[in-house]
Image: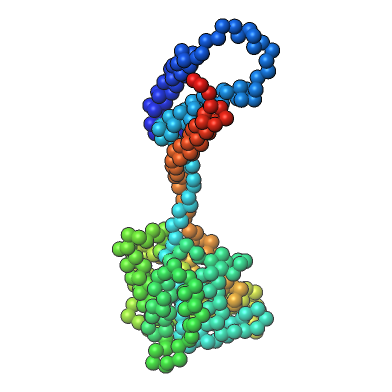
């Protein structure tokens, strides 16, 4: 406890003088008696035994009033965790090829359904491998021949997850295709706009691209879009849905050995885009491998946390004032009733 006006304690010096003056006045006004020896052996009454209480109550209450005038305050040091989230644009391929099958446990499901499930788990968490992104701004952009902003950047993650659940593959032939370069450029522009909002305290800006095809539509070339993201300090994490890689070495009919196939041109392009912007490239061929990729991204992009210590100050004046009032009330009650004396 601290006191904002400690000079008030100088008033406590008056209390001994007041006590001395009070005793002196009482002696001056006392009735003289010739021989007090006549009262030797007389037992004191219970009132006489507690005659010390009124002056004790009075001077205690005055001391408490002085303490209240000193403006007492209590201080509590607290710690607050400030979180600096990440702005993430999630890009999802909705071209017709996303209706092809992919492994989901012991069965197969359309790529789109598996992708939707993993992205929803990435957003909200699955209670196991994926913890969710509760502190991050998230947005959804889909693309086939053209990119579309399905959900703007928001902290309303339940709404974002609902938008993901409603996604469907493109069914219009004139809009089919794959324009992930345009989607990257659009996502970079959306993230760049956030710099103009002073309320956004963002640790980093990230694009997560999920596609199963080559860029064959749109205005931008893939490396052009990557340079835009790179110039804005935006990382691109690229994920391609592909066939399961074969790691074993096989012997061909002519007797030669064949090892694992080299990366496709599209995979090399996506890897280059990721490296240019500081991200990573991964391929997925099943629900488990796709979940593992998002889990790796989840681990790489951590929300920044900063501990801030601050002090809460609360006035303690009321406690001293109430205690003084209670003691004064007892003093006047006893002086006026059971301990009324003269003088």
Q: Position of residue 215 (x, y in %)?
A: 41, 80
Q: Can residue 89 be seen in this view?
A: no
- For residue 23, above or below residue 174: above
Q: Which of 199 and 242 is in front in this view?
A: 199
Q: Image check: 6 left or right of 125?
A: left
Please give the name of the residue rendered at 48% of the width and 86% of the height, measured from the top-left corner. 169
The percent coordinates of residue 235 (x first, y second) are: 42, 65
- Residue at x 39% of width, y 92% of height: 174
Q: Residue 277: which quarter of the image?
A: bottom left
Q: Nearer the viewer, residue 208 or 53?
A: 53
Horizontal relation, residue 264 to residue 292: left or right = left
Identify the residue at horizontal 65%, vertical 19% (top origin): 44
Of all residues, the one furthest to the left in this rendering is: 196
**44 on left or right of 133:** right
* Position of 287 relative to 299 (above/below): below
Q: Can residue 96 be seen in this view?
A: yes
* Residue name at image x 45 percent, y 40 percent: 318
Please determine whether, in this image, residue 240 is positioned above or below residue 16: below
Q: Where is residue 88 in the image (x, y as percent from the top left)?
A: 43, 67
Q: Which of 234 and 213 is in front in this view?
A: 234
Q: Nearer the viewer, residue 148 or 1?
A: 1
Residue reaching furthest to the bottom: 173
């Amino acid at each position: 406890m601290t006191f904002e006006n400690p000079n008030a304690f100088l008033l406590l010096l008056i209390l001994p003088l007041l006590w001395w003056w009070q005793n002196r006045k009482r002696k001056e006004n006392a009735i003289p008696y010739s021989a007090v020896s006549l009262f030797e052996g007389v037992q004191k009454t219970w009132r006489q035994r507690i005659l010390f209480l009124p002056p004790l109550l009075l001077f205690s209450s005055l001391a408490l009033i002085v303490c209240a005038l000193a403006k007492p305050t209590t201080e509590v040091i607290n710690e607050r965790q400030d979180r600096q989230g990440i702005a993430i644009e999630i890009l999802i391929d909705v071209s017709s090829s996303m209706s092809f099958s992919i492994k989901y446990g012991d069965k197969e499901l359309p790529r789109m359904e598996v992708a939707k499930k993993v992205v929803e788990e990435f957003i909200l968490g699955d209670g196991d491998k994926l913890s969710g992104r509760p502190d991050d701004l998230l947005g959804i952009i889909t693309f086939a021949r053209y990119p579309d902003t399905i959900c703007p950047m928001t902290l309303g993650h339940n709404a974002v997850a609902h938008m993901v659940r409603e996604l469907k593959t493109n069914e219009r032939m004139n809009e089919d295709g794959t324009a992930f370069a345009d989607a990257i450029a659009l996502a970079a522009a959306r993230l760049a706009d956030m710099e103009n909002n002073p309320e956004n305290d963002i640790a980093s800006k990230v694009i997560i691209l999920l596609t199963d095809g080559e860029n064959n539509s749109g205005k931008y070339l893939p490396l052009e879009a990557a340079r835009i993201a790179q110039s804005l300090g935006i990382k691109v994490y690229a994920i391609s849905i592909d066939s399961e890689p074969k790691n074993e070495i096989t012997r061909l009919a002519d007797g030669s050995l064949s090892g694992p196939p080299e990366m496709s041109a599209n995979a090399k392009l996506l890897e280059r885009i990721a490296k240019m912007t500081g991200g990573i490239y991964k391929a997925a061929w099943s629900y488990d491998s796709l979940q593992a990729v998002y889990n790796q991204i989840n681990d790489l992009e951590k929300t920044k946390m900063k501990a801030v210590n601050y002090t809460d100050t609360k006035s303690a004046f009321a406690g001293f004032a109430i205690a003084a009032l209670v003691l004064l009330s007892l003093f006047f009650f006893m002086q006026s009733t059971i301990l009324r004396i003269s003088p």
